[in-house]
Each structure stands twice: as C-alpha cells, then as structure tokens.
Amino acid sequence: MPELPEVEQVRRILMRTVGLTITEVSVLDEGILDVSPSKLSRALCDRTVMDIKRHGKQLAVVLDDGSVLAMHLGMTGDVVISDQQDQARHVRLVIRFDSGVYLSFIDQRKFGVVGIAPSFDDLILEKGLGPDALEIGPRKFEARVGDHHRAIKTTLLDQKVLAGVGNLYSDEMLFQCRINPKVKADSITPRKMKCLHRAMMDILVRSIEERTDFERLPNNYLLHGRVKDGRCPRCASQWTIEDINGRTAFYCPKCQRILQ
C-alpha cells in the first residue's frame, strides 16, 4: 500500500497539472467514487487547478473555487499524466485538460477512493486524519502516540493518531529504535519516543529523496531485506514475522526483544 513517501511522489507528478483547466471527466468505473459521476463532472469541469496538496496518504487537487478533488490511492492506486489517454487495463478515471494532457487514475484492486470536498481543511476533517507525519513535532508526537494502551505498531498505523505512516515504514521506525512492535504505546519511555520521532522523520525524508527505491536506502535499514527468510542487518538473526491486530510485522527477535 502506498505510504506517505509514495503518495508524495504522486503529488509531485500531479504538480504538472497546476494552471491547467479541466475540460472533460470520464468515469470508467464508478466503484472508486464516493460521489456520483455526474456530480463529480459538474464539480470539476471548467475548473482550473491551483495547487496539489497532501496530508498523510490523502491527495488533494485544489481548484480555483477552493474545492478539492480528493484522491486516496488505497493499496494499488497510481496516477499517470500523459499527452495521450492511457489505455492501461485498470484505468478507472480519466480527466482531460485544456492543454491536451490527460490524468489517469489507475487502480488494479479498486481500494482507491476519488471524491470531492468543499476545501482541503474540510477534507482532513471529514476523513478524521491526525497530524501529517512530516509536520508533527516531537512533543506532540509523544503526546498523541503515547496516549494509547495498545501495541505501538497498531498505534502508528492509526491514521486518526498520525497520518501517513503505514506497515512498511512503521516496521523500519521500530527497528531503528530497537522497539518491539507488540509493546504498549503508553509504556514507551520519553527517550524512545524521541528516537521514534527522529527515526520517522529521517526515514520518510530519505525515502522521498530516493524516490522510494528501497535499494538506495542505507544498508542498515530493515526495508532492504523485509522478506520471508530475511535477516537483521545488525545481528543476522532471521526476522520474526507476526500478525499484530491484522497487520504483518517484521522485527528482529534479538535487537527488538521485549525487556522485562
């Protein structure tokens, strides 16, 4: 599933549409919409794109009347900007601009969602999203994350607590700070909370800089070998792979053991 760095890459691609005016909207699969096709078309046609924003994993195309085209990529969503209409098998939505450029929303498994909202702030409120992971400070991070008596892995994945961190990057954060993913969030020390916040910032920024190419990440990252039979880059222990509240966690049984 695309997480904050992957969604940020899409935001940067969408910046190509700023200043362009929407002339046509073609819905090829209504299953991705949380609004009727006719309402979507009325809201978008003849509107000019003013900006592209992101909050966590949520994308927003800001239009000249202040409203936004909201896009969530789900598990397999992607956006392609091209000079010709994309003929890919899983194109669900096509938007044409006055310059002749096309925006295609592609989603194989159809977990993505496209809709409209009165404004960017309204969108964040409607979705109930917590602070963006790249904008939250260390004190607020500790206050929000440490206020939950449940597994730290589960807490980091809760988009109402913190927007943008998903399964892969939460594993990396916890690995870098040597924290077991099953430890209760409210039991983590302030020192470890600061480590988590610092690791989150470093990992997300680095991934964005490397265009989410895990092969270009530092060799001491878990993400290099987050596969079955993979091994810890510190101690060479084989990963423990465990389901934690419905999400798969990879961690080192030695470096991230629970201290009694």
Image (tube, helix red, strand yellow):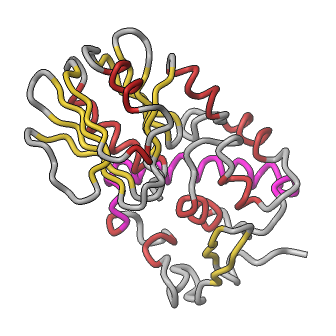
Question: Which contiguous range is marked in magenta?
Answer: 185-214
Q: How many marks?
A: 0
**Quarter occupied by the C terminus:** bottom right
Tell me residue 249's x, y (percent): 63, 72
Residue at x-position 40% and y-position 43%? 30
Vertical comparison of 108 with 60: above or below? below
Q: Give how far across and how far down residue 34 sits, in percent.
A: 50, 37
Residue found farthest to the right: 260
Query: Which residue is depicted at the point 23% across and 22% down?
Result: 22
Q: Main secondary structure of the magenta part?
A: helix
At x 48% / y 32%, what residue is drawn? Answer: 35
Q: Quadrant of residue 15?
A: top left
Q: Is residue 75 left or right of residue 82?
A: right
Q: Is residue 201 inside the magenta stretch? A: yes
Q: Is residue 5 above or below residue 143?
A: below
Residue 120 at what x, y percent from top left?
A: 50, 21
Towards the viewer: 47 or 194: 47
- The residue most toward the top is 65
Q: Residue at x 50, y 43 (%)?
A: 57
Q: Percent from the top left, x then y, of residue 62?
A: 38, 20
> Viewed as shown, does residue 214 lie left or right of 234?
left
State whether residue 153 is above or below residue 209: below
